[in-house]
Amino acid sequence: MSLVFAGVCSHAPGITGRKDRAEPQVRDAFYAALERMRQAVENARPDVLIVVGAEHFANFFMNNMPAICVGMAEHYDGPIEDEAWLGIRRHRVPGAPRLARDLIQDVMNDIDLAYAEEWKFDHGIMVPLEFLTPRYDLPVIPVNINCQGPPLIPLRRCYEFGRALRRACDARPERIAVVGTGGISHWPATPDSGRINERWDREFLDRLLANRREELIAYRDDETWREAGQGGFEIRTFIAVAGATEGCTGDLWFYAPIPIFAVGCTVAVMRVSSR
Amino acid sequence: MSLYYTQKLLFQLNRDTATVRRFEQDPEGLLAEYDLTEEERGALREPDIGLLYVMGVNGQILMHFAALRGYEWSAYIEAMREGERKHGPVRTGLYTRAETR
Protein backbone atom coordinates (compact mmCIF):
# COMPACT_ATOMS: atom_id res chain seq x y z
CA MET A 1 0.00 0.00 0.00
CA SER A 2 1.42 3.34 -0.97
CA LEU A 3 -1.21 5.61 0.57
CA VAL A 4 -0.11 5.74 4.19
CA PHE A 5 -2.29 8.58 5.49
CA ALA A 6 -5.45 10.41 4.44
CA GLY A 7 -7.29 13.16 6.24
CA VAL A 8 -9.05 16.48 5.88
CA CYS A 9 -8.73 19.79 7.68
CA SER A 10 -9.76 23.43 7.46
CA HIS A 11 -7.54 26.14 6.00
CA ALA A 12 -9.25 29.48 6.67
CA PRO A 13 -6.79 32.38 6.96
CA GLY A 14 -8.25 33.43 10.30
CA ILE A 15 -6.96 30.18 11.85
CA THR A 16 -3.49 31.71 11.93
CA GLY A 17 -4.20 35.35 11.11
CA ARG A 18 -6.81 36.06 13.78
CA LYS A 19 -5.82 33.53 16.42
CA ASP A 20 -5.75 36.13 19.18
CA ARG A 21 -9.41 36.98 18.59
CA ALA A 22 -10.77 33.45 19.03
CA GLU A 23 -12.13 32.05 22.24
CA PRO A 24 -8.95 30.43 23.68
CA GLN A 25 -10.48 27.17 24.91
CA VAL A 26 -12.04 26.11 21.60
CA ARG A 27 -9.12 27.47 19.59
CA ASP A 28 -6.59 25.50 21.62
CA ALA A 29 -8.67 22.32 21.32
CA PHE A 30 -8.67 22.82 17.53
CA TYR A 31 -4.92 23.43 17.48
CA ALA A 32 -4.45 20.28 19.60
CA ALA A 33 -6.39 18.24 17.02
CA LEU A 34 -4.19 19.66 14.25
CA GLU A 35 -1.11 18.75 16.30
CA ARG A 36 -2.51 15.22 16.69
CA MET A 37 -2.90 15.13 12.92
CA ARG A 38 0.70 16.30 12.47
CA GLN A 39 1.82 13.48 14.73
CA ALA A 40 -0.26 10.96 12.76
CA VAL A 41 1.25 12.17 9.47
CA GLU A 42 4.73 11.90 10.95
CA ASN A 43 4.02 8.42 12.34
CA ALA A 44 2.94 7.30 8.87
CA ARG A 45 6.50 8.20 7.62
CA PRO A 46 5.39 9.63 4.28
CA ASP A 47 7.90 10.48 1.55
CA VAL A 48 5.56 13.09 0.16
CA LEU A 49 2.38 14.92 1.09
CA ILE A 50 -0.32 15.56 -1.50
CA VAL A 51 -2.45 18.54 -0.49
CA VAL A 52 -5.79 18.66 -2.29
CA GLY A 53 -6.78 22.27 -1.85
CA ALA A 54 -9.00 25.01 -3.15
CA GLU A 55 -6.81 28.00 -3.83
CA HIS A 56 -8.12 31.52 -4.00
CA PHE A 57 -6.78 33.10 -7.19
CA ALA A 58 -3.15 32.94 -6.16
CA ASN A 59 -2.25 31.26 -9.45
CA PHE A 60 -5.32 30.49 -11.46
CA PHE A 61 -7.62 33.09 -12.91
CA MET A 62 -10.58 33.23 -15.25
CA ASN A 63 -8.30 33.69 -18.26
CA ASN A 64 -7.47 29.99 -18.12
CA MET A 65 -9.05 28.25 -15.13
CA PRO A 66 -8.29 24.55 -14.76
CA ALA A 67 -10.95 22.35 -13.18
CA ILE A 68 -8.14 20.38 -11.54
CA CYS A 69 -4.46 21.23 -11.61
CA VAL A 70 -1.54 19.31 -10.08
CA GLY A 71 1.77 20.92 -9.18
CA MET A 72 4.93 19.58 -10.77
CA ALA A 73 7.37 22.22 -9.52
CA GLU A 74 10.77 21.81 -7.86
CA HIS A 75 9.60 24.07 -5.07
CA TYR A 76 6.76 26.37 -4.03
CA ASP A 77 6.88 29.77 -2.34
CA GLY A 78 4.23 31.01 0.01
CA PRO A 79 2.26 32.54 1.41
CA ILE A 80 1.39 35.20 -1.18
CA GLU A 81 -0.43 37.04 1.59
CA ASP A 82 1.16 39.60 3.88
CA GLU A 83 3.01 37.63 6.57
CA ALA A 84 1.56 39.62 9.45
CA TRP A 85 -1.98 39.48 8.04
CA LEU A 86 -1.85 35.69 7.73
CA GLY A 87 0.38 35.04 10.72
CA ILE A 88 2.65 32.79 8.66
CA ARG A 89 6.23 33.57 7.57
CA ARG A 90 7.33 33.09 3.96
CA HIS A 91 8.78 29.69 3.22
CA ARG A 92 10.09 27.75 0.29
CA VAL A 93 8.38 24.36 0.26
CA PRO A 94 10.10 21.45 -1.50
CA GLY A 95 8.20 19.79 -4.35
CA ALA A 96 8.37 16.27 -5.75
CA PRO A 97 8.44 16.88 -9.52
CA ARG A 98 9.32 13.40 -10.70
CA LEU A 99 6.70 11.63 -8.63
CA ALA A 100 4.17 14.34 -9.51
CA ARG A 101 4.84 13.83 -13.21
CA ASP A 102 4.31 10.07 -12.95
CA LEU A 103 1.13 10.47 -10.89
CA ILE A 104 -0.28 13.01 -13.34
CA GLN A 105 0.47 10.75 -16.28
CA ASP A 106 -1.24 7.85 -14.55
CA VAL A 107 -4.31 9.82 -13.37
CA MET A 108 -4.79 11.14 -16.91
CA ASN A 109 -5.85 7.63 -17.94
CA ASP A 110 -9.11 8.47 -16.16
CA ILE A 111 -9.32 12.22 -15.55
CA ASP A 112 -8.05 15.16 -17.60
CA LEU A 113 -5.68 17.31 -15.58
CA ALA A 114 -3.78 20.53 -15.94
CA TYR A 115 -0.30 20.72 -14.49
CA ALA A 116 1.88 23.58 -13.31
CA GLU A 117 5.62 23.90 -12.81
CA GLU A 118 5.17 27.30 -11.18
CA TRP A 119 2.82 27.82 -8.28
CA LYS A 120 2.59 30.17 -5.32
CA PHE A 121 0.85 28.95 -2.20
CA ASP A 122 -1.86 31.01 -0.52
CA HIS A 123 -3.50 30.36 2.84
CA GLY A 124 -5.39 27.42 1.33
CA ILE A 125 -2.24 25.32 1.47
CA MET A 126 -0.01 27.33 3.83
CA VAL A 127 -2.35 27.11 6.83
CA PRO A 128 -2.45 23.29 6.76
CA LEU A 129 1.33 23.11 6.18
CA GLU A 130 2.02 25.47 9.08
CA PHE A 131 0.41 22.92 11.40
CA LEU A 132 1.19 19.62 9.66
CA THR A 133 4.77 20.22 8.44
CA PRO A 134 5.91 23.18 10.55
CA ARG A 135 9.55 22.69 9.46
CA TYR A 136 8.44 22.79 5.80
CA ASP A 137 10.74 19.89 5.06
CA LEU A 138 8.29 17.30 3.67
CA PRO A 139 8.01 17.42 -0.14
CA VAL A 140 4.56 18.52 -1.24
CA ILE A 141 2.52 17.91 -4.37
CA PRO A 142 -0.28 20.49 -4.50
CA VAL A 143 -3.57 19.75 -6.19
CA ASN A 144 -6.06 22.50 -6.87
CA ILE A 145 -9.72 21.92 -7.54
CA ASN A 146 -11.45 25.08 -8.71
CA CYS A 147 -14.05 25.75 -6.01
CA GLN A 148 -14.17 29.54 -6.34
CA GLY A 149 -16.24 30.30 -9.39
CA PRO A 150 -18.60 28.35 -11.62
CA PRO A 151 -18.56 26.44 -13.82
CA LEU A 152 -17.30 23.95 -11.24
CA ILE A 153 -16.33 20.33 -11.72
CA PRO A 154 -19.22 18.02 -10.71
CA LEU A 155 -18.87 16.26 -7.37
CA ARG A 156 -18.89 12.80 -8.93
CA ARG A 157 -15.84 13.82 -10.96
CA CYS A 158 -14.08 14.88 -7.76
CA TYR A 159 -14.75 11.44 -6.33
CA GLU A 160 -13.50 9.90 -9.58
CA PHE A 161 -10.37 12.02 -9.40
CA GLY A 162 -9.76 10.70 -5.88
CA ARG A 163 -10.17 7.14 -7.10
CA ALA A 164 -7.75 7.73 -9.97
CA LEU A 165 -5.25 9.37 -7.63
CA ARG A 166 -5.46 6.36 -5.33
CA ARG A 167 -4.86 3.96 -8.22
CA ALA A 168 -1.85 6.00 -9.28
CA CYS A 169 -0.47 6.09 -5.73
CA ASP A 170 -0.95 2.36 -5.33
CA ALA A 171 1.28 1.78 -8.33
CA ARG A 172 4.15 3.64 -6.64
CA PRO A 173 6.73 2.47 -4.13
CA GLU A 174 6.74 5.82 -2.30
CA ARG A 175 4.85 6.29 0.94
CA ILE A 176 2.24 8.95 0.17
CA ALA A 177 0.06 11.00 2.51
CA VAL A 178 -2.93 12.96 1.26
CA VAL A 179 -4.73 15.79 3.00
CA GLY A 180 -7.82 17.48 1.63
CA THR A 181 -8.42 21.01 2.80
CA GLY A 182 -11.43 23.24 2.47
CA GLY A 183 -14.34 24.65 4.31
CA ILE A 184 -17.65 22.95 4.75
CA SER A 185 -20.40 25.54 5.12
CA HIS A 186 -19.06 29.08 5.24
CA TRP A 187 -19.50 32.51 3.73
CA PRO A 188 -15.88 33.71 3.63
CA ALA A 189 -14.94 37.16 2.39
CA THR A 190 -18.51 38.45 2.54
CA PRO A 191 -20.46 40.54 5.06
CA ASP A 192 -21.78 37.17 6.33
CA SER A 193 -18.28 36.01 7.26
CA GLY A 194 -18.58 34.04 10.50
CA ARG A 195 -21.91 32.48 9.56
CA ILE A 196 -21.67 28.67 9.82
CA ASN A 197 -24.40 26.04 9.28
CA GLU A 198 -23.38 23.46 11.87
CA ARG A 199 -26.27 21.11 11.09
CA TRP A 200 -25.29 21.03 7.43
CA ASP A 201 -21.64 20.51 8.31
CA ARG A 202 -22.33 17.58 10.61
CA GLU A 203 -24.55 15.91 8.03
CA PHE A 204 -21.81 16.30 5.44
CA LEU A 205 -19.18 14.93 7.82
CA ASP A 206 -21.40 11.90 8.54
CA ARG A 207 -21.60 11.14 4.83
CA LEU A 208 -17.87 11.75 4.38
CA LEU A 209 -16.67 9.64 7.30
CA ALA A 210 -18.98 6.75 6.39
CA ASN A 211 -17.69 7.28 2.82
CA ARG A 212 -21.16 7.00 1.34
CA ARG A 213 -20.35 7.97 -2.23
CA GLU A 214 -23.90 8.31 -3.51
CA GLU A 215 -24.83 10.66 -0.67
CA LEU A 216 -21.64 12.68 -1.05
CA ILE A 217 -22.13 13.31 -4.74
CA ALA A 218 -25.86 14.01 -4.32
CA TYR A 219 -25.31 17.60 -3.17
CA ARG A 220 -26.43 20.15 -5.75
CA ASP A 221 -24.45 23.36 -6.06
CA ASP A 222 -27.50 25.62 -5.95
CA GLU A 223 -28.61 24.01 -2.68
CA THR A 224 -25.08 24.12 -1.30
CA TRP A 225 -24.87 27.81 -2.18
CA ARG A 226 -28.13 28.50 -0.34
CA GLU A 227 -27.51 26.40 2.75
CA ALA A 228 -23.73 26.31 3.03
CA GLY A 229 -22.61 29.47 1.25
CA GLN A 230 -20.30 29.86 -1.70
CA GLY A 231 -17.55 28.50 0.57
CA GLY A 232 -19.46 25.23 0.64
CA PHE A 233 -18.28 24.57 -2.92
CA GLU A 234 -14.99 23.55 -1.29
CA ILE A 235 -16.50 20.20 -0.24
CA ARG A 236 -14.94 19.09 -3.52
CA THR A 237 -11.57 18.71 -1.81
CA PHE A 238 -13.02 16.48 0.91
CA ILE A 239 -14.92 14.40 -1.64
CA ALA A 240 -11.70 13.81 -3.58
CA VAL A 241 -10.17 12.39 -0.39
CA ALA A 242 -13.25 10.19 0.03
CA GLY A 243 -12.64 8.89 -3.50
CA ALA A 244 -8.98 8.23 -2.67
CA THR A 245 -10.08 6.22 0.36
CA GLU A 246 -13.08 4.44 -1.15
CA GLY A 247 -14.06 1.51 1.04
CA CYS A 248 -12.57 3.17 4.13
CA THR A 249 -14.38 4.99 6.87
CA GLY A 250 -13.00 7.81 8.96
CA ASP A 251 -13.01 9.44 12.37
CA LEU A 252 -13.87 12.97 13.36
CA TRP A 253 -11.07 14.31 15.54
CA PHE A 254 -12.46 17.81 15.86
CA TYR A 255 -15.35 19.94 14.73
CA ALA A 256 -16.48 23.25 16.14
CA PRO A 257 -17.75 26.45 14.57
CA ILE A 258 -15.27 29.25 15.30
CA PRO A 259 -16.91 32.36 13.82
CA ILE A 260 -13.83 34.62 13.90
CA PHE A 261 -12.08 31.94 11.82
CA ALA A 262 -15.13 32.10 9.50
CA VAL A 263 -15.52 28.32 9.28
CA GLY A 264 -16.56 25.20 11.16
CA CYS A 265 -13.06 24.09 12.10
CA THR A 266 -12.54 20.47 11.18
CA VAL A 267 -9.95 17.74 11.60
CA ALA A 268 -10.86 14.24 10.39
CA VAL A 269 -8.81 11.22 9.43
CA MET A 270 -9.68 8.29 7.18
CA ARG A 271 -8.65 4.80 8.23
CA VAL A 272 -6.61 3.96 5.17
CA SER A 273 -5.42 0.68 6.71
CA SER A 274 -9.01 -0.57 6.98
CA ARG A 275 -9.31 -0.93 3.22
CA MET B 1 -16.06 42.31 -19.57
CA SER B 2 -15.10 45.25 -17.38
CA LEU B 3 -15.60 43.39 -14.10
CA TYR B 4 -13.28 40.74 -15.48
CA TYR B 5 -10.48 43.29 -15.90
CA THR B 6 -11.11 44.83 -12.50
CA GLN B 7 -10.60 41.42 -10.99
CA LYS B 8 -7.62 40.73 -13.22
CA LEU B 9 -5.82 43.82 -11.98
CA LEU B 10 -6.58 42.85 -8.37
CA PHE B 11 -5.37 39.31 -9.08
CA GLN B 12 -2.03 40.71 -10.28
CA LEU B 13 -1.75 43.03 -7.29
CA ASN B 14 -2.42 40.15 -4.90
CA ARG B 15 0.38 37.97 -6.17
CA ASP B 16 3.01 40.19 -7.72
CA THR B 17 5.07 42.68 -5.73
CA ALA B 18 6.28 44.44 -8.89
CA THR B 19 2.66 45.25 -9.78
CA VAL B 20 2.14 46.57 -6.24
CA ARG B 21 5.14 48.90 -6.66
CA ARG B 22 3.75 50.15 -9.97
CA PHE B 23 0.37 50.74 -8.37
CA GLU B 24 2.04 52.83 -5.67
CA GLN B 25 4.30 54.79 -8.03
CA ASP B 26 2.15 55.14 -11.15
CA PRO B 27 -1.45 54.16 -10.43
CA GLU B 28 -2.88 55.96 -13.47
CA GLY B 29 -0.42 54.27 -15.82
CA LEU B 30 -1.30 50.87 -14.41
CA LEU B 31 -5.06 51.49 -14.46
CA ALA B 32 -4.84 52.66 -18.07
CA GLU B 33 -3.60 49.22 -19.10
CA TYR B 34 -6.89 47.61 -18.14
CA ASP B 35 -10.23 48.02 -19.86
CA LEU B 36 -12.10 49.67 -16.98
CA THR B 37 -15.05 52.02 -16.55
CA GLU B 38 -14.63 55.32 -14.72
CA GLU B 39 -16.57 53.89 -11.78
CA GLU B 40 -14.18 50.94 -11.58
CA ARG B 41 -11.09 53.13 -11.84
CA GLY B 42 -12.44 55.31 -9.03
CA ALA B 43 -13.22 52.33 -6.80
CA LEU B 44 -9.72 50.94 -7.31
CA ARG B 45 -8.02 54.29 -6.75
CA GLU B 46 -9.79 55.27 -3.56
CA PRO B 47 -10.07 52.30 -2.70
CA ASP B 48 -13.80 51.80 -2.24
CA ILE B 49 -13.88 48.23 -0.95
CA GLY B 50 -17.66 48.32 -0.50
CA LEU B 51 -18.27 49.40 -4.09
CA LEU B 52 -15.89 46.76 -5.45
CA TYR B 53 -17.84 44.16 -3.45
CA VAL B 54 -21.16 45.45 -4.80
CA MET B 55 -19.77 45.39 -8.34
CA GLY B 56 -19.31 41.64 -7.91
CA VAL B 57 -15.57 41.29 -7.36
CA ASN B 58 -14.94 37.81 -5.97
CA GLY B 59 -14.36 38.11 -2.23
CA GLN B 60 -11.27 35.94 -2.29
CA ILE B 61 -9.71 38.49 -4.63
CA LEU B 62 -11.06 41.51 -2.76
CA MET B 63 -10.01 40.24 0.70
CA HIS B 64 -6.33 40.31 -0.22
CA PHE B 65 -6.61 43.75 -1.82
CA ALA B 66 -8.30 45.10 1.31
CA ALA B 67 -5.46 43.69 3.42
CA LEU B 68 -2.92 45.23 1.04
CA ARG B 69 -4.56 48.61 1.46
CA GLY B 70 -4.37 48.31 5.23
CA TYR B 71 -7.91 47.32 6.12
CA GLU B 72 -8.06 45.60 9.49
CA TRP B 73 -10.40 42.56 9.46
CA SER B 74 -13.44 44.17 11.10
CA ALA B 75 -13.03 47.34 9.04
CA TYR B 76 -12.94 45.22 5.88
CA ILE B 77 -16.15 43.36 6.78
CA GLU B 78 -17.79 46.67 7.70
CA ALA B 79 -16.69 48.23 4.39
CA MET B 80 -18.61 45.55 2.50
CA ARG B 81 -21.72 46.14 4.63
CA GLU B 82 -21.40 49.87 4.09
CA GLY B 83 -21.04 49.21 0.37
CA GLU B 84 -24.38 47.39 0.31
CA ARG B 85 -26.04 50.20 2.26
CA LYS B 86 -24.60 52.91 0.03
CA HIS B 87 -24.62 51.29 -3.39
CA GLY B 88 -27.39 48.69 -3.11
CA PRO B 89 -27.26 44.91 -3.41
CA VAL B 90 -24.42 43.08 -5.13
CA ARG B 91 -24.97 43.47 -8.86
CA THR B 92 -23.61 40.20 -10.21
CA GLY B 93 -21.70 37.06 -9.38
CA LEU B 94 -21.61 34.75 -6.40
CA TYR B 95 -22.65 37.24 -3.77
CA THR B 96 -25.98 38.40 -5.09
CA ARG B 97 -28.35 37.90 -2.19
CA ALA B 98 -30.70 34.92 -2.44
CA GLU B 99 -33.73 37.16 -2.69
CA THR B 100 -32.27 39.05 -5.64
CA ARG B 101 -31.06 36.02 -7.60
Image (spheres, coloured by chain):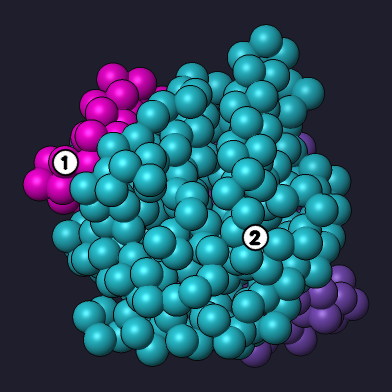
Left or right: A126 with respect to A253?
right
Q: Which residue is label 2 attached to?
A: A122
Residue A141 in sight in this render: yes
Q: Position of residue A74 (x, y in %)?
A: 70, 83
Residue B70 placement, left or right of A269: right
Residue at (67% x, 52% y) in the render: A129
Nearer to us: label 1 or label 2: 1
Q: Which residues are magenta?
A: A193-222
**Residue A218 magenta-highlighted:** yes
Magenta span has A66? no
Q: Nearer the viewer, residue A195 or A10?
A: A10
> Which chain is depicted purple?
B
- For the residue carrying disc 2, how many other residues have a C-alpha within 10 Å: few (<14), some (14-19), or many (20+)? many
Q: Could you say where residue A120 lies in the image, as x and y percent from the top left?
A: 67, 72
Label for residue A212? 1
Q: Nearer the viewer, residue A196 or A30?
A: A30
Q: The chain drawn cyan is chain what?
A: A
| Chain to which mark 1 belongs | A
* Labels 1 and 2 touching (C-beta < 8 A): no
Q: Amino acid at mark 2?
A: Asp
Q: How many marks?
A: 2
Q: Chain of mark 2?
A: A
Residue at horizontal 63%, vertical 54%?
A45
| The residue positioned farthest toward the top in the image shown | A25
